[in-house]
Each structure stands twice: as structure tokens, then as C-alpha cells.
Amino acid sequence: MLSIEEIKENLKREDYLCDHNLATILSLSSLLKKPLLLEGPAGVGKTELAKSMAQAFDMELIRLQCYEGLDEHQALYEWNYQKQLLYLQSTTKNDSNWTSAQKDIFSPDFLLARPLLKAFLSEKPVVLLIDEIDKSDEEFESFLLEALSDFQVTIPEFGTVKAKSIPMMFLTSNGSRDFSDGLKRRCVHYFIDYPDFDRELEIIKTKVPGISEKLSQQIVDFIQQLRKQKLRKKPSIAETLDWAKVLLALNIESLEDERIKDTFNFILKYQEDIALVTS
């Protein structure tokens, strides 16, 4: 079990600001060996949390990026068909070894491990990030249930593979669809929202060294006001940081600078949003 203070201190060294509540969830999830389902708007630090945990505790990060149409073969395994074919070509049907050869081609020597299987085959615990799972379909979600609850996967031609070491599992979702009760039951749920003023200010000062207190406060105040407007896409923390770095690079000391409007493309991703803000 990872202690709460250890998590906070290690993440802080990676410039990830973790409050007591999140550190508690991470600690108890590690105790129960439960996957953590992180939900919230895009760009609030869900993926970054998994990356930072891997770095903070010197663990390999294995990432499975989800998308529409993702299936178990792309997530779990594939057979090395070229290697199988070459092996079979070296064995004729008249050969007494033909039967054993057919079995051999479905052995570990011909197996190509994809992210999920790679994590389970690792001798040391890894951080397994299943990113943007809401972009996958319900069939893939159902396939994951065995892995999330029993830390094992089944390969039809090969059998059941149990995790050699239980990975620290993170699933992220931007909330584009709901999940089944089965997936929810197997995970610890945690919602990461946009930060409040003080938290976002602290993030900027941590991630953008050299920025002034005055400019940092103005940036946060402006961004937080933007998020209250009816924008097609609200600025994320990542975009706030990009903007802060741009303003620092341009030696802009205040948002009253007339060059500010030329930098809105770094925080607003749609022309109608830019038009709304600049009108």
C-alpha cells in the first residue's frame, strides 16, 4: 500500500499537485488493488496523473489509447503470422512433426503482446493507462471486465494468462458516454474537475517558472471567466499553461497588453469562440 503522504510528496517532485482527497483515493486503490476510473473534462490532468504516478514511483508506463472500433486483438495480442507461416513452410504435411508444428505456432514464441498483455506479462508492477475508454464501444468494455476484476485475460488459442504482477491501472474518460454497472463496480471512481482559482494559480506557478504573480493571477481570473461563457470548448489546464508560457515568451506583463488578442488561439480552439471573446 502506498501511503498518502508518500503519494503527495512523490507527485509533487514530478510537479503534479495532488490534494489530500485524491492522494487518499490513490492510496486506498493501491491497497485494494482496484483500477481507478478517472472522469472529468478533457485537459484537467487525468492522463497526466497516470504518467506522473509512473515517474514518481519509477514504474514503466504502458498506455492503451482507446478509439472507436478498438478490439481485443489490438489491445491484447496478435499472432506473428509471418513467423508462423515461415515455420509451417519448413514443415511438410508428410512430416511426422506436422501435428506438433500446428501446436507450436500458437506458443509464446509466436505471440505479439499488445499493451494489456504486455502489462500482465511484466515481472514488475507497471502503470497501465487505458486512456479515453469512453471512445471505445460497449463490446470492448465488456471484454475488459475479466482483466479489471481478475487481472487475467483469455486468449482462445493459448489459454488464460494471469498477471505476473498486478499493475496499477488507470482508466480515463471525458464523459462522452456512460459505462455499464459491471465496469463501474470493478473500479474506484474519481472525478477531476476544473480547478478553483487558488489551485490553478498554484499549477501555473509550478509549471511555468519565472512567471510573475500579477500575470499569473490575471491569467487564472481570465480563464475562469472564460469557462463560465457558452463556449464550444472551454480552455483546459493544459491550454492555460500553454498560454502562460506564450505570454512569458513574449515578455507580456499584463493582460492589458494589446498583443493579447493575437495569442487567443492558444486557449480557444474554435473561431466562433475567438469571435465571441474578442467581440
Image (cartoon, grey):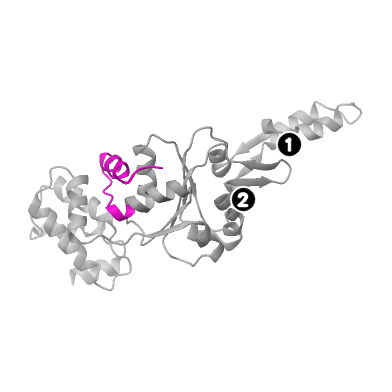
| Residue 5: in magenta span | yes
Residue 11: which disc? none
The residues colored magenta run: 1-22
Please state if 107 lies on the left or on the right of 209 as rendered: right
Classify the position of the C terminus by image quarter. bottom left
Residue at 25% from the left image edge and 67% from the top image edge? 227
Residue at 72% from the left image edge and 46% from the top image edge? 156
Q: Amino acid at mark 2?
A: Glu
Classify the position of the N terminus by image quarter. top left
Residue 24 location, x and y as percent? 34, 52
Distance (Cα) linking label 1 and label 2: 17 Å
Residue in the foreground of this view, choosing between 279 and 136:
136
Residue in the foreground of this view, choosing between 279 and 115:
115
Characterize the local packing of mark 2: few (<14), some (14-19) or many (20 or more) Cα atoms within 10 angstroms. some
Residue 196 location, x and y as percent? 22, 62
| Residue 164: in magenta span | no
- Earlier in the chain: of badge 1 and badge 2, it is 2
Compared to residue 56, the image places residue 185 above or below, namely: below
Q: Quadrant of residue 161?
A: top right
Residue in the foreground of this view, choosing between 145 and 156:
145
Q: Amino acid at mark 1?
A: Phe
Query: What secondary structure is marked by label 2?
Result: helix
Seen as rendered, the residue at the extreme right is: 94
- Residue 45 in view in this figure: no
Please state if 247 lies on the left or on the right of 135 as rendered: left
Q: Quadrant of residue 97?
A: top right
Q: Which residue is mark 1?
A: 106
Q: Which residue is mark 2?
A: 72
Residue in the foreground of this view, choosing between 83 and 62:
62
Characterize the local packing of mark 1: few (<14), some (14-19) or many (20 or more) Cα atoms within 10 angstroms. some
Please state if 54 lies on the left or on the right of 230 as rendered: right
